[in-house]
Amino acid sequence: MKLSPIIIFAYSRVNHIKRLFNSLSKNYLYNQSKIYVFSDAAKDETTENGVIEVRRLLRRQAVSKNISIIERKYNLGLSENIIKGLNEIFTLHDKAIILEDDLEVSVHFLKYMNDALEIYKNSKQVCSVSGYMYPINPKNFSSNFFFLKLIESWGWGTWKRSWRNMELNPIKLKNQIESKERIEEFNLGQGIKYYQMLLNNISKKNNSWAVRWYGSNFLKNMLTLFPDKSFVRNIGIDGSGIHCGFSNTFDTKLSNKYNKINAKEIKEIYSDREQIKNFFEKTKYKRIFQNITGRIKNFIKA
């Protein structure tokens, strides 16, 4: 099996990316993997020192590892950095494992991702592989690995064939979701406002690449493989980031086991989808409260 390259998108939080590399290095496939890091340039003076420190760290890592560093000369922002970066990668490779710099991974992360990307490489119904799972009791799911009509952007993998489906125009996505009367399904019920995120994308209130990636695959009824226990943990929702405040809603423990992938049927099981819907609905008000308090804290710090 040819190993998938690891793609990392980095910005200005040096302590976070140190933790990412430390966790990756505990995977036995790490030293055998080709790594590309897309380092975005500073947006302003407040992030300039952070970007410099991150790039120093990356250069030290690259001395003895199979790492290519792509240093952006101008600030692209997260969304454009990811879209352009993956467009570049898929001129060279047919698959990729994608990470942002505020994640930690399990010692089994690379094995799971490489296995899944190999097993489902020719399965046209499958658009991606998620390494993350929400903090839900794994006993509630139908299997150790299962499919959802959803995407997750915290430690994931995909193929060139899937990335071609990416529709960058949010207006086209919005119009199709509306015409097919699938807004509630797109939102997984009432628990999360993906549709509103899409509207905000159109009005330039956000520039989320992920909601467009989700919408592109949702409209094609594509599926993502998920594990019942998470191989990824987000360490960046701590008030230190550009795109998020503080929240512990999505905190999860890293899986210390990896059993062979056993998702036999490539279809979404109703009960698995209901577990995700219930999670979002139960945590809705907690997420709103933490978002408001996080904004207040950031305002006070400013």
Image (spheres, rainbow, N blue to C red):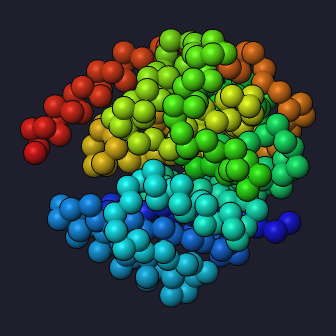
Instruction: Specify the quadrant that holds the C terminus.
Output: top left
Residue located 45% across and 41% down the image: 208
Compared across the picture, whether 98 is left or right of 18 comes to right
Q: Quadrant of residue 143?
A: top right
Instruction: Specify the quadrant that holds the N terminus.
Output: bottom right
> Is residue 209 placed above or below 39 in the rendered structure?
above
> Residue 151: where, in percent of width, then height?
62, 36
Compared across the picture, whether 112 is left or right of 47 comes to right
Residue located 73% across and 15% down the image: 271
Count how many numbered circles sit on residues in the image: 0
> Residue 226: where, in percent of width, then height?
70, 37
Q: Nearer the viewer, residue 89 or 298?
A: 89
Residue 194 seen: yes
> Is residue 218 placed above or below 237 in the rendered structure?
above
> Residue 126: where, in percent of width, then height?
79, 40
Q: Nearer the viewer, residue 75 or 264?
A: 75
Q: Quadrant of residue 57?
A: bottom left
Residue located 24% across and 25% down the image: 292
Q: Nearer the viewer, residue 265 or 230?
A: 265
> Is residue 277 placed above or below 146 in the rendered structure?
above
> Residue 67: where, in percent of width, then height?
56, 78
Compared across the picture, whether 179 is left or right of 23 comes to right
Residue 29 seen: no
Residue located 43% across and 83% down the image: 60
